[in-house]
Amino acid sequence: MKKRKIKVFDTTLRDGEQSPGASMSVTQKLEFALMLEDLGVDRIEAGFPVSSEVQFKAVEEISKKVKKSTIVSLARCVHNDIESANEAMKHAKDRMLHLFIATSPIHRKYKLGMSKKEILKRIGESIRYAKYYFDNIEFSPEDATRTERDFLYEVIEVAIANGATTINIPDTVGYSVPEEFEELIKSIIRNVPRVSEIDLSVHCHNDLGLAVANSLAAISAGATQVEVTVNGIGERAGNCSLEELVMAINIRKDYLPFKTRIKTKKLYKASKLLESLTGLIIARNKPIVGENAFLHEAGIHQHGVINNRKTYEIIRPEDIGRDPEHLVLGRHSGKHSFREKLKYYNLKLTKEQFEKAFSKFQKIADKKKEVSDDDILIIVANVLGQYPNGYRLEYFDVKTGNKIYPSATVKIKKGETKMVSSSTGNGPIEAVFNAIDSAIGLKAKLKDFVVSGVGAGRDAQGQVKVVINVEGNNYVGRGNSTDIIEASANAYINAINRYNFSMEAANLIKKQNSKKEKRVS
């Protein structure tokens, strides 16, 4: 049976990054985009340029460096969004605009305040305007699965008539079940004849745990593209998981006569890199890439696996890159070995970034017998997430115990300026955070504090993620160390640096807009 090619549209860097706490720096997003390119993704949705300076810069940098995948930018049906996407992707070798507007009754009434006629007019005008800049345009009727069928067909017809080259059907709130979604795709193909001229895509959310099942049902019905994220991250319960979808296609070739460009032996690397960059730790029982996916505890299972792994494993660990030639690094490992490990994960650092990462590796190697791959990925993630002109922790001293009130002293450095302050708290970490606030002169409200272990054993690193609120906005910070207090302090400072960067970017935008207004006047 001839296999039909399915395009993989990855939105980890756009919809995936909208997961609470999953935001990445520009350099982190670029590194992951390069991983996606190496993985074989057809289209990479790099971000939403008009939404922030960081988003714009990330899309711009990714457009410069990625050459083998199509770069996609999200835009509302608004001229300014389209212009921003065009500017951000001006260096892209191959690019596509992703336009969207909501179409369901509940969105029309409560979000847009627009009639069907107004929405159809906006779609036509926006796509025609976008055609001045883009040859390749994807259009999404947001909340398509809760949109009246006749109106949905009309929306799609208008989009294609005005120049859309891909139509995406989003199950925006994860409402559909597989049989229903399959029938919807078939009905679109039956009722909109021109759909055969373009790509028909699907974007499924996982609110009912059915994103992968719905996506498989859709391609069985005739969809030619699937929108996914690595590790299934995304808004609320996430999106269709790239690794689960691809491996389902690969393993069930007898039932799913499809193929993709994805290099499955790089799936595990991509999963672990994303976990390190975002700090979103995947569940141990996560299919394909979870730590328990190839572990067997029950005696009868162990006996079967010892005799023949196929008794309880339908996927070989090496098929997704989980059984590589293992290069163990430690205190005696040099730059060559460290560079080889980075190469294995397709991490391309600048000379300055490499030196910083290697220096951190050496410090950790002095404290641990072996430095795991997870340790190294965390080191690189933190180096990529640093702000060169931001605050740095130079020194901290904590006094704590069950009979004394915890206190901390910190020395913070920014450029050539050094700040020293002391404070107390209900515990040693709160004392450190209060001392940092006092030194910097910023009062942030701690919204979330998560500690997770990296690797195993007493000498394992601790990874800390914090969310702080400053002036009504949340900022995420991450830090790691074999000392959990140091990891916490670095995560807190990283979040403050993210806040400062966003403020600097906002001021820059104001200045640029002010100059434009003066030129116009």
Image (tube, grey):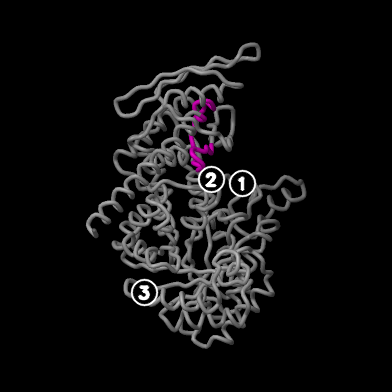
**Amino acid type at mark 3:** Tyr
352 and 501: which is toward the camera: 501
Point out which mark residue 129 bears. Answer: 3
Q: Nearer the viewer, mark 2 or mark 1?
A: 2
Majority SS type along the magenta span: strand
Q: Earlier in the sequence, mark 2 or mark 3?
A: 2
Q: Position of residue 509 (x, y in %)?
A: 33, 50
Measured from the top left, where is residue 338 in percent x and y? 39, 39
Tell me if residue 255 comes above or below residue 85 in the rendering: below
Q: Residue at x 62, y 12 (%)?
A: 404
* Quadrant location, the N terminus: bottom right
Residue at 66% of width from left, 58% of height from top?
310
Whether label 2 touches label 3, CB < 8 Å:
no
Judged from the image, the secondary structure of the residue bearing numbered disc 1 is loop
Please, is residue 238 above or below residue 424 in the view? below
Between 261 and 173, the one lying in front of the other is: 173
Q: Residues within 10 Å of mark 3 (few under 14, many from 20)?
A: some
Magenta part of the chain: 466-488
Provide the residue designation for mark 1: 291
